[in-house]
C-alpha cells in the first residue's frame, strides 16, 4: 500500500545522526581553536555526583519509607551537605516544605504521594 | 527568604477559604472532603436532596467487610468519562461496605499499566480493578502479562455500543445502501477509528468482514478526533458510539445509519440495529465493570457484588448516569465472564485477520 | 441576556472563583514539576458541587494563571514552571543575570495578559467561523504545521547549528519510544510495558530542564550569585511597552491560531512566536541576550493559546490542547455538552464564561504586577535551600501525574542527560520541540498516506498542507545553506 512502516522514520533519523556527527567531528578537527575541555568527572563535578547519589537514595527511600519521612530526611541531608548550619533553617525548611506539599497533594488535591512498602 | 513559602501558604489558606465560601454560597457543603478521606467527588451532592448527604461514618457499612479499605484501580486517565463513573460510584460503595473506598488512576500504555498492576494486587478484598473493554484488546496488541483470565469478574455496571455514522450528505441512507456502495467502490471507503487495535477499530473490522466489504481503516488519536475527521469530510464513516458523535449529528454534519447493539438503544429508538439487518455477529460491548484479583474469596466477592448493585440502584447514581448518558447494564459475575469470553474471540479473530497480532 | 451575563459574572462567588483560580494557577505554574494540566485535572473534582459557570471559571482561572506562572521561574532560575514557558527562558534568564529580573517579569505579565485578552476577543467574535476552518484541518495540514514547527529548531539553535540539530534529532528519537500510533508496533520498548506507552512528557521536560539546571547550579553552589538583589526595575519602562506592543499583537494572534488547532498548545506556539519575532526584528542577533521582544513574544503567544484552545473545545468538543482536554471533562460533568448546541441551549452560561475569561486575564495582570516584588524574592533564596526544594518539587510533580514510580526514574535519567548536554554546549530547547512535534509530524504523515491510500499526491493537492510544507522546507534549509555559505566564504578568506 505504500504507507511507510514503523521502521521508516527511525532509519531516517539514524542517517541524520550519523551525518551530523560526521560534520561535527570534521569541523572540530578543522577549527583548531582553543580546545575547551568539558569537565564531567573532575573534582569540580564531585558535588554533582554526590548529590545524584543522594537523590537515588531519596527515591529508594520513597518506595520503602514513604513520602513524608524520605523527603524530610533527604532535605535535611542536602541542606547539611550544602553547609547550612542554621538550626532554624535545617528544621523549618524540610518540615515546612514537606507539610506544604502533603497539604496540597494529599489533602487538597487527594492525589497519592508515594507510600512506602515498609510502612 | 522563607517569606515566599509562608506567604504562599497563607495565600493557599485564603484560597481554600475562598473556595469553601464559594461552595457554601451555593448551598452545598464542601466540608465533606475532609471527612471522607479518599473520596474524590461530591457528585452525590449535586442536585439531589436539599439537605446535604450525611457524612459517611466509616464502620457504618451494611455488611461486615473484612478488609480495611478498598482501592479501585482505574486504568483510564483521570477526568475522562470512564473515570468519572467510577469516582461517582465510590462513595456509594463505601456506604455499603463501611470501609474507605479510594479511586486510583494508573494510566498509561493504553490501559496496560493499570491492568497489569491490578492483576498483581493481593486477592484479599483490598482492591478491585475497573474492568473496561481494553482489557480484551490490549493483550493482543502488546506484550503484556495479563489477559481477562487473570482476574475474577465481579459485575458489570454499564455498557455502550458502537454505531455506523456517516456524513450527512452521503449518497446512502441505510446500512444496506452503505454496504452496496462499499461493494461498488472497493478500497475507497475510509472508516476512522480511535487507534490501531482499539475497540472501535476491531468493531469496524468485524463489521467489514461480516458485510464482505473492502474498506480502509484510518487511525486517529481517539474517538473525538475521528468524529471530527468525519465531520470535516476526511473519512467516510466512523464506528464509534452515538454519544461520541452526538455533537456532529446535532450540528447537521453526520447521520447515524445503524447501531451495533443487541437491541435498539432507548435513546435512539428509530435506529435499526445491525443485528436486525442481518449483521448480528458484529457486536462489541464497551463495558465498564469491576474485576478482582484471581482467587479472591467467595464471600468477599459476594459482598462486593452487593455493594456495586447497591451503588448502581441508588438514586444519586441513577440520576448521574441518566444525565451523563450512561446506560445501566448489570451483569453478574458469570454473565460478565461469558461476555468477555465471547467477545475475546472476536478480538482474537480480527487481530489475526488484520495482521496485528504481536 | 447581556444584563444576565453581567450579573452572573460580577457576582461575588464568580469573582472569587476567578480570583482563587488565578492565584492557584500562578502558584502551580510557577513551581517546576507542577503544570497547568495537572492543576486543572486535580482540582476538577472539587468543582462538581459548584454551579457550572463558577466551577468552570475556577478551572479557567487556573489555566490562565498557570500558563503565565511558568514564566516566573523560567525568568528567575532558568527553569520553566510549565512546558509553555520553555521558550521564555531564552531571553528571560539573561535579564535576571543582568540584574533586571523585575523588568522581565513585568514584560512577561503585560505580554501574557495582552495575549490572553487578544485571544479572548478573537474567541468571542470569531469562534464559530474559526471552528469551521478548523474542521478542514486534518492529517496533511497538521503534518505541515508540525514540520514547520520542527524547522524552527534551526532558528533556536543559538550558536551551533549542528549541535542544535543534534539535540533536535535526539528529541525525535526519544519521541519514538513506545507503541507506534499507526500500526501499534512497539519501538524501543525493550519488552517493558511501561515503555510501551512512551515517555511521559512532563517527567522528561522537568528532568531535562529543571533537574539538569539544578545539577549545573550545584557546581558553583558556594559561589556568590550575581548581584541580583538590586532590582533595578519593578515595572517595564514606557519604552519597553512601546517596543513590545506590536510583538504582543503578533504573538497573541499567532497563539490564538495555534491554540485553535487540536493538539497544538502553548508549548509549541511560544517557540513559533519567538522565532517569528526574531525573523521580523531589526536586530535578530540580540535575541538570547535579554531583550523585551524575546520575553514578550513567547508569553503573549502561550497565553494566546488559552483562548484559542477554547474555540475548538466549545464549538466542536475537540480540545485544542492538553489543558482543554481536561476542561472538556469538566464541561461534560456540568452537562454542558460542547458543540453548536451549546451556544443555543446554554447561551448565558457560555457568554458568562467568556466574560469570566477576560476578567481572569485582568486579574492575572493585576496579581502579576503587584506580586512582582514577591516573586523576585525567590532569587534571594540561597541556592543551598532552593536546589533541594526544587528537586523535591520535581519528584512530586513527576510522580503525581501517573502515580507511577518509574516516571521519576525517567525524570532522573532525563536530568542527567540534560546535564551532560548542557555541559557539552547543546541547546535543550530543540529537544522539547522535537518531543512534541515529532510524533505529531510522523503520525500525521503516515495517517495522511493511509487516508490517501498510499498516494503522496495528497500533500500537493491540498493547498494548506502544501503551503506549510513549503514554508517548513525553506525555514529549515535556509539557515543550513547560509551556514554552509558562510563557512565556505570563511575558508576562502583565510
Image (cartoon, coloured by chain):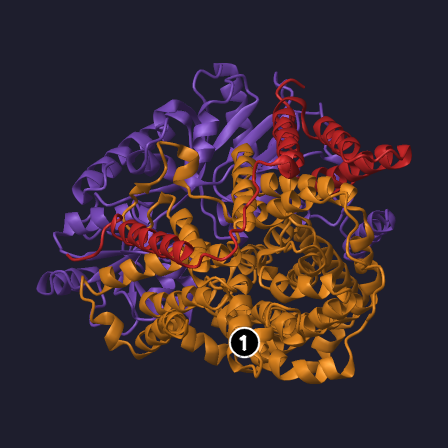
- Of residue C339 and residue C335, the one placed in the foreground of this image is C339
Q: Quadrant of residue B35?
A: top right
In the figure, the purple chain has which letter? B
Is the residue B84 above or below the residue C13 in the image? above
Is residue A33 visible to the viewer in this orientation of the structure? Answer: yes
Residue highlighted by disc 1: C278
Q: Position of residue B237 (x, y in %)?
A: 27, 62
- Of residue B83 and residue B155, the one placed in the foreground of this image is B83
* Colour chain C appears in: orange
Q: Residue furthest left?
A: B184
Q: Position of residue C386 (x, y in %)?
A: 75, 45
For image coordinates 14% across by 65% down, the residue present is: B181
- Of residue C271 and residue C325, the one placed in the foreground of this image is C271
Task: Judge left or right: residue C414 versus residue C224.
Answer: left
Task: Judge left or right: residue C325 versus residue C220.
Answer: left
- Of residue C83 and residue C62, the one placed in the foreground of this image is C83
Q: Residue furthest front?
A: C494
Is the residue A43 above or below the residue C291 in the image? above
For the N terminus of chain C, give its image quadrant: bottom right
Q: Chain of mark 1?
A: C
In the figure, the red chain has which letter? A
For the C terminus of chain C, give its image quadrant: bottom left
Q: Position of residue B151 (x, y in %)?
A: 41, 24
Q: Position of residue C347 (x, y in %)?
A: 59, 74
Dot 1: what SS? Answer: helix
Is the residue A34 above or below the residue C397 in the image? below
Amino acid at each position: 500500500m505504500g504507507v511507510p512502516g514503523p521502521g521508516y522514520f527511525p532509519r531516517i533519523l539514524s542517517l541524520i545522526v550519523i551525518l551530523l556527527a560526521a560534520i561535527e567531528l570534521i569541523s572540530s578537527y578543522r577549527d583548531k581553536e582553543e580546545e575547551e575541555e568539558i569537565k564531567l568527572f573532575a573534582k569540580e563535578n564531585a558535588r554533582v555526583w554526590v548529590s545524584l547519589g543522594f537523590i537515588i537514595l531519596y527515591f529508594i527511600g520513597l518506595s520503602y519509607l514513604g513520602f513524608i519521612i524520605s523527603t524530610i530526611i533527604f532535605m535535611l541531608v542536602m541542606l547539611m551537605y550544602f553547609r547550612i548550619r542554621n538550626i532554624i533553617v535545617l528544621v523549618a525548611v524540610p518540615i515546612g516544605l514537606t507539610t506544604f506539599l502533603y497539604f496540597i497533594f494529599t489533602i487538597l488535591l487527594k492525589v497519592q504521594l508515594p507510600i512506602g512498602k515498609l510502612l | 527568604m522563607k517569606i515566599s513559602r509562608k506567604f504562599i501558604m497563607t495565600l493557599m489558606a485564603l484560597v481554600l477559604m475562598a473556595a469553601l465560601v464559594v461552595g457554601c454560597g451555593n448551598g452545598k457543603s464542601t466540608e465533606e472532603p475532609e471527612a471522607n478521606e479518599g473520596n474524590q467527588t461530591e457528585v452525590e451532592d449535586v442536585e439531589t436532596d436539599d439537605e446535604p448527604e450525611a457524612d459517611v461514618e466509616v464502620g457504618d457499612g451494611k455488611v461486615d467487610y473484612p478488609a480495611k479499605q478498598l482501592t479501585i484501580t482505574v486504568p483510564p486517565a483521570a477526568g475522562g468519562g470512564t473515570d468519572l463513573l467510577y469516582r461517582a460510584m465510590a462513595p456509594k460503595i463505601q456506604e455499603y461496605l463501611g470501609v474507605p473506598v479510594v479511586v486510583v488512576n494508573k494510566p498509561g500504555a493504553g490501559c496496560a499499566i493499570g491492568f497489569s498492576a491490578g492483576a498483581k494486587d493481593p486477592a484479599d478484598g483490598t482492591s478491585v480493578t475497573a474492568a473496561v473493554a481494553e482489557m480484551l484488546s490490549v493483550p493482543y496488541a502488546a506484550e503484556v502479562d495479563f489477559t481477562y483470565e487473570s482476574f475474577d469478574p465481579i459485575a458489570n455496571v454499564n455498557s455502550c455500543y458502537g454505531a455506523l455514522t456517516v456524513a450527512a450528505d452521503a449518497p446512502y441512507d441505510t446500512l444496506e445502501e452503505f454496504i452496496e456502495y462499499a461493494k461498488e467502490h472497493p478500497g475507497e471507503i475510509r472508516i476512522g477509528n480511535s487507534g490501531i487495535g482499539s475497540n472501535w477499530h476491531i468493531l469496524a473490522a468485524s463489521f467489514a468482514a461480516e458485510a464482505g466489504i473492502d474498506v480502509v481503516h484510518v487511525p486517529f488519536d481517539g474517538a473525538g478526533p475521528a468524529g471530527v475527521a468525519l465531520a470535516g469530510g476526511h473519512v467516510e464513516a466512523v464506528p464509534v458510539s452515538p454519544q461520541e458523535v452526538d455533537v456532529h449529528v446535532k450540528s447537521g454534519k453526520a447521520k447515524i445509519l445503524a447501531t451495533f447493539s443487541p437491541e435498539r438503544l432507548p435513546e435512539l429508538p428509530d435506529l435499526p440495529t445491525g443485528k436486525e439487518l442481518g449483521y448480528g455477529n458484529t457486536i462489541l460491548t464497551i463495558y465498564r465493570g469491576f474485576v478482582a484479583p484471581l482467587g479472591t474469596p467467595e464471600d468477599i466477592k459476594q459482598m462486593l457484588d452487593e455493594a456495586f448493585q447497591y451503588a448502581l440502584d441508588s438514586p444519586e447514581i441513577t440520576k448521574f448516569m441518566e444525565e451523563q448518558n450512561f446506560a445501566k447494564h448489570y451483569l453478574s459475575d458469570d454473565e460478565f465472564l461469558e461476555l468477555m469470553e465471547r467477545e475475546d474471540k472476536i478480538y482474537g479473530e480480527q487481530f489475526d485477520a488484520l495482521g496485528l497480532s504481536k | 441576556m447581556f444584563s444576565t451575563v453581567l450579573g452572573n459574572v460580577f457576582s461575588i462567588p464568580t469573582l472569587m472563583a476567578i480570583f482563587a483560580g488565578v492565584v492557584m494557577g500562578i502558584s502551580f505554574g510557577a513551581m517546576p514539576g507542577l503544570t497547568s494540566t495537572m492543576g486543572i485535572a486535580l482540582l476538577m473534582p472539587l468543582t462538581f458541587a459548584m454551579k457550572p459557570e463558577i466551577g468552570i471559571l475556577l478551572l479557567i482561572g487556573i489555566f490562565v494563571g498557570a500558563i503565565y506562572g511558568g514564566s516566573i521561574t523560567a525568568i528567575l532560575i532558568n527553569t520553566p514552571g510549565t512546558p509553555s514557558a520553555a521558550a521564555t527562558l531564552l531571553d528571560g534568564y539573561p535579564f535576571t543575570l543582568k540584574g533586571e529580573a523585575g523588568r522581565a517579569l513585568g514584560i512577561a505579565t503585560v505580554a501574557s495578559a495582552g495575549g490572553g485578552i487578544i485571544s479572548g476577543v478573537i474567541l468571542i467574535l470569531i469562534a464559530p467561523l474559526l471552528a469551521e476552518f478548523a474542521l478542514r484541518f486534518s492529517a496533511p495540514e497538521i503534518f505541515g504545521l508540525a514540520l514547520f514547527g520542527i524547522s524552527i529548531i534551526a532558528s533556536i539553535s543559538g550558536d551551533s547549528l549542528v549541535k542544535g540539530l543534534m539535540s533536535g534529532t535526539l528529541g525525535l528519537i526519544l519521541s519514538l519510544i513506545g507503541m507506534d500510533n499507526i500500526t501499534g508496533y512497539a519501538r524501543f520498548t525493550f519488552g517493558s510495558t511501561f515503555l510501551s506507552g512512551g515517555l511521559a512528557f512532563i517527567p522528561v521536560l522537568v528532568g531535562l530542564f529543571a533537574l539538569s539546571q539544578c545539577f549545573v547550579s550545584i557546581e558553583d553552589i558556594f559561589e556568590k550569585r550575581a548581584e541580583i538583589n538590586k532590582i533595578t526595575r519593578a515595572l517595564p519602562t514606557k519604552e519597553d511597552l512601546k517596543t513590545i506592543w506590536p510583538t504582543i499583537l503578533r504573538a497573541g494572534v499567532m497563539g490564538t491560531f495555534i491554540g485553535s488547532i487540536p493538539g497544538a498548545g502553548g508549548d509549541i506556539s511560544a517557540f513559533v512566536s519567538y522565532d517569528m519575532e526574531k525573523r521580523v526584528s531589526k536586530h535578530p542577533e540580540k535575541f538570547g541576550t535579554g531583550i523585551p521582544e524575546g520575553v514578550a513574544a513567547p508569553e503573549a503567544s502561550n497565553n494566546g493559546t488559552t483562548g484559542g484552545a477554547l474555540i475548538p473545545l466549545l464549538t466542536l468538543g475537540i480540545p485544542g490542547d492538553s489543558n482543554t482536554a481536561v476542561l472538556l471533562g469538566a464541561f461534560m460533568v456540568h452537562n454542558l455538552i460542547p458543540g453548536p448546541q451549546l451556544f443555543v441551549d446554554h447561551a448565558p452560561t457560555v457568554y458568562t464564561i467568556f466574560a469570566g475569561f477576560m476578567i481572569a486575564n485582568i486579574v492575572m495582570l493585576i496579581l502579576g504586577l503587584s506580586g512582582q516584588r514577591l516573586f523576585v524574592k525567590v532569587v534571594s533564596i540561597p541556592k543551598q535551600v532552593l536546589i533541594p526544594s526544587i528537586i523535591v518539587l520535581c519528584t512530586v510533580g513527576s510522580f503525581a501525574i501517573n502515580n507511577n514510580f518509574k516516571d521519576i526514574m525517567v525524570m532522573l535519567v532525563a536530568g542527567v542527560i540534560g546535564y551532560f548536554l548542557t555541559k557539552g554546549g547543546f541547546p535543550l530547547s530543540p529537544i522539547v520541540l522535537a518531543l512534541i512535534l515529532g510524533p505529531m509530524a510522523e503520525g500525521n504523515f503516515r495517517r495522511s498516506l493511509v487516508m490517501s491510500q498510499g498516494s503522496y499526491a495528497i500533500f500537493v493537492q491540498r493547498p494548506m498542507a502544501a503551503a506549510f510544507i513549503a514554508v517548513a522546507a525553506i525555514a529549515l534549509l535556509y539557515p543550513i545553506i547560509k551556514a554552509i555559505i558562510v563557512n565556505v566564504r570563511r575558508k576562502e578568506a583565510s
